[in-house]
Amino acid sequence: MQSLLIANRGEIAVRVIRTAKEMGIRTIAIYSEADANSMHVKLADKGICIGPPEPSKSYLDTPRIMSALEVSGADAVHPGYGFLSENPKFAEIVRASGKIFVGPSAETLELIGDKVKAKEVAKKVGLPLVPGSDGPVDFQKALEVASKIGYPIVIKAAAGGGGRGIRVINNEKELREKLPLAMQEAQVAFGDGRVYIEKYLINPKHIEIQVLADKYGKVLTLGERECSIQRRHQKLIEEAPSSYLTEEKRREMEELVAEFCREIGYEGAGTVEFLVDQEGNFYFMEMNGRIQVEHPVTEIVYGIDLVEWQIRIARGEKLNIQKPERRGYAIECRINAEDPNTFLPSPGMVEELYLPGGYGVRVDTHLYCGYSVPPYYDSLLAKLICWGQTREEAIKRSIRALEEFRISGSGLKTNIEFHKRVLSSREFQQGKHHIRFVEELMI
């Protein structure tokens, strides 16, 4: 692999470019007309414009990206996260063209992208599942399942992801009203109207296990991240490790995850996600076949570059490392361009930018003074990652760094104050937060 095309934008494109350069790999950035002045374009060895601002005509347009790949002469494609990163057809097209796709096979992406099929494999290897339907449901089947497991229940899209297409149902009347709407929403969002039903757990934790796996059958698990601070199923704060898990429970989860990955022949970096109830029982949700937004907290506590190993595995190298010893605690705050009270998007020009620093502080961002944040894409501006010997130290360092952080400009607002409120709350500091903490206690 001599050259790498990054089929993404923003901070993750910058992140991949930096590691690739350290590995001696030439980098090619693709960009929309709205991203012509973006940092990832400035840092790459070459930039290719692929279309207008709309994602459907640029970052989601496979023919345009493949044309850029052909013109660039790149050997490989790194999809980042979001956009086409978990699209099996895109992965298949890239590999059929004779190029390397930095990620799992198309077959694996198709399997884990179908939540129903993924759960079947999870059940086979002994991963606990949330009580619910065995597969997609129609109204009559949904009634039968709901009667068996009891309300509240949650409807989920079989081909869903990113928190989209989820509806909580409290009684039969709501089921009659919302099931057709959920099916319609799933069809529009994913081109697949199938839905399934699960028991709605009361205030669980959201915990995920990071994995690396090579094509020779070795699977390396790198502990967990807790992602319970979220709004509308979108993560806002992540940490590693979780203060909630015992070493025994962590080991049990990691062993089952490794078996799951071997069963599906997984290759590359990936994450297996769980809900953990108030009694400490864990339930498989899904697997994400890509690098996660929150991967830096794992990198910091384990001292390993996950993007580097993504690339090494993609070019056929063996995962010839032992599991590093976990060190300390890390917390990541997603700094978004949004109103801190309403969470509405708030793009604009960056006129003032001061990034925090000091021992144990890392900032991943694509911002610079004079950059205009476009309204067409995800609102993520930066990720603040802080490390501490203890969780208490990591929290204190994060609050200090947030107080230093300055992003301002015409029309631009951020959620920095929101993060300070959460980290300063008694519930978070005591580890008593859960996935509905923001909705119930902070807003």
Image (spheres, grey):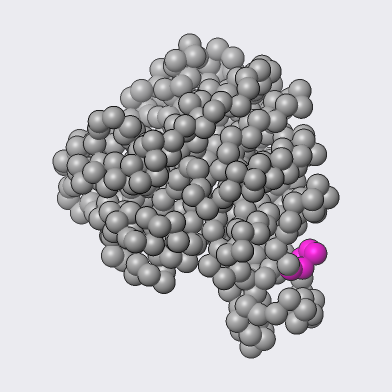
Residue at screen point 80% across, 39% down: 263
Q: Where 322 falls versus 158 (above or below)? A: above
Quarter of the picture containing the N terminus is: top right
Task: Left or right? Give the position of 145 relative to 237.
Answer: right
Measured from the top left, where is residue 51 in percent x and y? 45, 38
Q: Quadrant of residue 129?
A: bottom right
Residue at screen point 71% across, 40% down: 255
Task: Left or right? Give the position of 155 relative to 241.
Answer: right
Measured from the top left, where is residue 331 in percent x and y? 40, 43
Quarter of the picture containing the C terminus is: bottom left
Q: Where 374 falls versus 344 (above or below)? A: above
Count numbered badges in the picture: 0
Q: Main secondary structure of the magenta part?
A: loop
Q: Is residue 234 visible?
A: no
Measured from the top left, where is residue 268 in percent x and y? 64, 30
Please tell me which residue lies in front, 345 or 431.
431
Task: Left or right? Give the position of 314 relative to 28.
Answer: right
Measured from the top left, where is residue 290 in percent x and y? 59, 38
Q: Quadrant of residue 11?
A: top left
Residue at screen point 58% across, 74% down: 168
Q: Which residues are magenta?
A: 132-136
Q: Where 334 falls versus 428 (above or below)? A: above
Residue at screen point 64% across, 48% down: 249
Q: Quadrant of residue 84?
A: top right
Q: Where 171 falls versus 1 (above or below)? A: below
Residue most toward the right?
124
Q: Is residue 356 visible?
A: yes
Can residue 7 be found in the magenta stretch? no
